[in-house]
Image: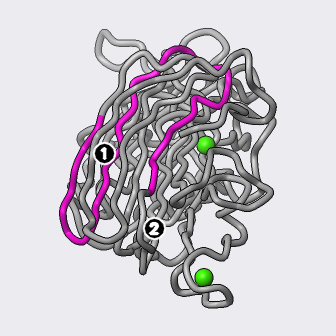
Amino acid sequence: MCVGDVCQDARCGAVTCATGTVCHDGRCVPETCVEPACGPGLACVEGQCVDPSCLGVTCPFGGACVGGRCVGADAGRLDAGTFDAGTVDAGRPDAGSGPCLGLSEGAACGPVTVCRGQRCRGGACVTENLADGTRCADAGVCQPAGLCQAGTCNQPPPTACLTGDIQVSLTWDMQGRDLELHLIRPGGRINDTTNRSDCTWNTCVSSQPDWGVPGVATDNPRKDVDNTGALGPENIALNGPEAGSYAVLVEHWGGGMPSTAQVVLQVRGVARTFNVSGLPSHWVWDVARIDGTSGAITGVGSTRDCTGSWSSGCTLMLP
Ligand SMILES: [Ca+2]
Ligand SMILES: [Ca+2]
């Protein structure tokens, strides 16, 4: 229909929309997108231009939906508990450090969003921006597993971060795929699944190795999650360390690009941060030692090429 000198959708003739919305097909929708303004092949859903083939598709952490398929995640090692949802939480203030708050119940979500997610840094939960298209709110102690159902995020009850006399937290960048955190007891070695002297993805998440006093569970290490995509975090905590030197190592487990990573150690209230850049796939970063008696932290900072000694993890006798 013609209103004044302007052609207008006849179904919007009697519709008055609030600021920030426009009339489309007789109803007010966010002006952030109106078909066909979303471009070829995209649909406007709840204010977001999305690929229709990705509606209802939930990708593993680190992956994004393209053309109806999840890409960018190392799907080979995903546990059932590591799936997550794309979420959008624009305008929500930073939670800062403190208890895990989770994303707000009922927050809108979609496959292509500016995401905000919670991650565990130094034993505290923080909220930070994630890159466009990144799946966020991944499963973990500090990231409750949000489920995207019909475009709505549903969060389980928040939980607390792992705590202990020794706390180790690992995060990495978007280039890395499946970095792996290791805490190795005195005299132990990396990927020792026989004696379980290494607390890592296949020894320490679903069950715990019996360190310290045999038969006593309170002095066993715990790992919260094996994050198999980008960013992390992964956290390990241990109470009642024994005498001797504990080793903290990181593997670039998957086939990602050279990655920048950060480890935060908290030992009896003292925090130290260590960084590495350009860690290639199947290389190991030897981060630090922790003295179980004094709690003293000593940085190491070396890297080793394990590409020729790799079978479901580095097989070199490290540290
Ligand atoms: Ca991992
Ligand atoms: Ca024990």
Let me know if residue 12 appears in the view.
Answer: no
Residue type for callout 2: Ala
**Where residue 81 appears, x then y in whole percent?**
70, 59
Q: Is mark 2 within 8 Å of ligand 2?
A: no
What numbered label is drawn on residue 128? Answer: 1
Q: Is residue 227 positioned above or below 65 on the image?
A: below
Q: Secondary structure at mark 1?
A: strand
- Give the side of residue 134 with respect to residue 97, left or right: right
Mark 1, Cα crowd under 10 Å, few <14 / some 14-19 / many 20+, is some
Does residue 117 belong to the magenta stretch?
Answer: no
Residue 77 or residue 194, whichever sits in front? 194
Quick one: label 1 or label 2, which is nearer the N terminus? 1
Residue 253 figure quarter? top right
**Where residue 298 appears, x then y in whole percent?**
27, 46
- Give the side of residue 147 with respect to residue 13, left or right: right
Whereabouts is ligand 1, in terms of quadrant?
A: top right
Residue drawn at point x = 25 percent, y = 68 percent:
294
Residue drawn at point x = 50 percent, y = 51 percent:
234
Residue 249 or residue 317, whichever sits in front? 317
Residue type for callout 1: Glu
